[in-house]
Amino acid sequence: MCIRDRYQRRVHGESLSIATKEKDKVAREYEGVNEKYNTLQKELTEVKEEYERHNQELTAKLSQAELALSELRKELNGRQEQCELLQSDSAKAAMQHKESVENLTSKLKAISLLKDQIEKELTAKKTLLEDERAQHEAAMKVKDLELERLKQIEIQFTELQTKHVSVSYTHLRAHETVLDLVCRLLLEKKKKTK
């Protein structure tokens, strides 16, 4: 009877030890997930700030380009009026008008090319920002999944804290590993030799 009591106490102690190890493991996983969540939050804030900064820079560049374009259009209109007035005076004035128009046309083409380039840059930046937003949305989804896992871990952790159940010798035998089996057989062999 005494050996049986000792064995039951030992089994109960091992069950408590296993429960404590599981509890520590779950607590470590909880801390790791919490650190990942904080890191993702910081990265998301940095990306949002960078997005706002890029957006402001691109808006400023676009407004500058539009101002330059409107000034050049005004200049073009003024030059064209001057050329029309000079055209009636002489052929020399007509040549000057032609050269002026050609210069302004080339400037307008250059500005148009600049505008196209700025629009391409804006489109590329917008695509890049949308890709970054998509990546961060994916990261947020991962974070949500990790949070869900963290909640499950907390539930398991709470269950482990509140539930310490003794199990029977038959139950332990049903769940013993190869290592446990070897240890048990060695102990039984040692008892037989005594």
Image (tube, grey):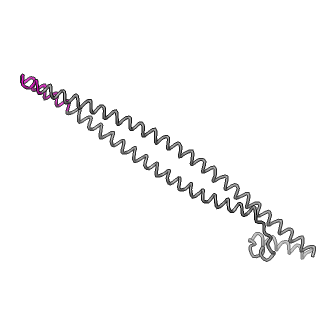
- Where residue 31 appears, x then y in whole percent? 67, 52
Q: Residue at x 70, y 56 (%)?
A: 27
Q: Main secondary structure of the magenta part?
A: helix
- Where residue 143 appears, x then y in whole percent? 56, 54
**Residue 54 versus residue 12 in the image, above or below:** above
Report the quarter where the N terminus lies: bottom right
Q: Is residue 98 magenta?
A: yes
Front residue (pair 99, 150): 150
Q: Is residue 91 left or right of residue 139?
A: left
Q: For residue 77, which quarter of the picture?
A: top left
Q: Is residue 138 magenta?
A: no
**Residue 105 versus residue 179 in the image, above or below:** above
Front residue (pair 71, 180): 71
Report the quarter where the C terminus lies: bottom right
**Residue 104 versus residue 180 in the image, above or below:** above
The residue range painted magenta reads 84-104
Q: Residue at x 65, y 52 (%)?
A: 32
Q: For residue 60, which quarter of the picture?
A: top left
Q: For residue 122, which quarter of the picture?
A: top left
Q: Is residue 75 left or right of residue 7?
A: left
- Where residue 15 appears, x then y in whole percent? 79, 66
Front residue (pair 122, 177): 122
